[in-house]
Image (cartoon, rainbow, N blue to C red):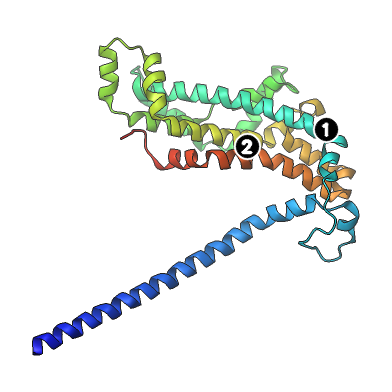
Amino acid sequence: MLNSEIRTKTAEEYAKDAKRAKVLGILKSIGIYTMLTIWAIAVLFPFFWMLITSFKTFGSYNAERVPSLLIKYPTIGNYLSAFTEINLAGYLLNTLIFTVITTLAMVIVSVLAAYAFSRLEFKGKEIVFTIFLALMMIPTELVVITNFVTVTNMGLRNTFTGLILPSVTSVFYIYLLRENFSQIPNNLYLAAKVDGTGDFKYLWKVVIPICKPTIITVLILKVIECWNSFVWPRLITDNDAYFLISQGIQAIRESGFGRENVPAMMAAVVLVSLPLIILFLVFRNKIMEGVARGGTKG
């Protein structure tokens, strides 16, 4: 009888503990999601404000003494003005050319260099790689000055070659790819060599397919980096015909058009931001996969 009462009491306590734990779990989840919601609103609000402002008329925007989150008279005229009153299309085209060529060249150079450091054997490889990593410690500002003097002496100012040349390699991306390539079992490489497979074929048929998520991640990050480039293009070009979108937006902001017609300025910024947003939404799973996983499958 006594043992039965003890067992019944223990079961009741277990039920209470389970109920208490469930309530605490729910409260914890509510707290976490509340904080995440507040953080998301704080991060996304500037983009929301930019978007709604781009659809306001010039008159309604200037008539607002207190900024409004509602659009009384929506219009797409600001987007038309962004193309007709300024050279936005030219800036976008220049940025697209710069981004595509620079990204492809950087990915090719980085993949080949990473493969050489991870698989090929040559004298002084570790010393060279150590020196290579030491370059990451040099501030970017010092490299920019050196590149500016070099490119200027080569007569490449106000050219796409001058814009692209300093950006075709990246120590960080080479290091990242080298670490991923090194995780591929060496037995695959040895088996391929026994079968008479050359290094380029092994790289193309084995290494790149296995490390594809990481390579795609590097490619996307480089696209974002190129699209947002400002300091180097600002230094090396002063001809409007070679302005990238970052310089174009700055020129618009500094001109009377950007200071006076804020809704049209916001429309231009929306158009500039849209390609990167679409790129991230399309490849977000690949980005997460490339960051989360290592270099091997299965």
Compared to 244, does 37 lie above or below? Answer: below
Q: Are marks 1 and 2 in contact (CB under 8 Å)?
A: no
Quarter of the image where one finds residue 267 = top right
Position of the N terminus by quadrant: bottom left
Q: Is residue 82 left or right of residue 235?
A: right
In-image side of 262 versus 272 (left or right) = right
| Crowd around label 2: few <14 · some 14–19 · many ≥20 (10 Å) | few
Q: For residue 122, what is the image quadrant?
A: top left
Q: Position of residue 165 (x, y in %)?
A: 62, 22
Q: Dot 2 lies on which element?
A: helix
Residue at x 53%, y 62% (from the top left corner): 36
- Kindly identify the amino acid type of the residue bearing the numbered disc 1: Asn
In this view, the residue in front, 148 or 271, is 271
Image mark for residue 136: none
Percent across and percent down for residue 30 are 48, 69
Q: Earlier in the sequence, mark 1 or mark 2?
A: 1
Q: Which percent across, then down, holds residue 198? A: 35, 11
Looking at the figure, which quarter contains the C terminus?
top left
- CA neighbours of label 1 inside 10 A, class few (<14), some (14 to 19), many (20+): some
Mark 2, residue position: 141
Q: Residue at x 73, y 56 (%)?
A: 49
Q: Is residue 98 left or right of residue 73?
A: left
Residue type indicated by callout 2: Glu
Q: Judge by depth and name the residue closer to the eye, 9 or 88.
A: 9
Work out which residue is located at the far top of the displayed protein and give it: 196
Residue 115 in picture, x, y percent from top left: 40, 23
* Residue at the spot of label 1: 87
Q: Quadrant of residue 97?
A: top right
In the structure shown, which secondary structural element does the residue marked by tag 1 occupy?
loop
Is residue 166 in view?
A: no
Q: Residue at x 68, y 41 (%)?
A: 274
The residue at 73%/35% (across/down) is 245
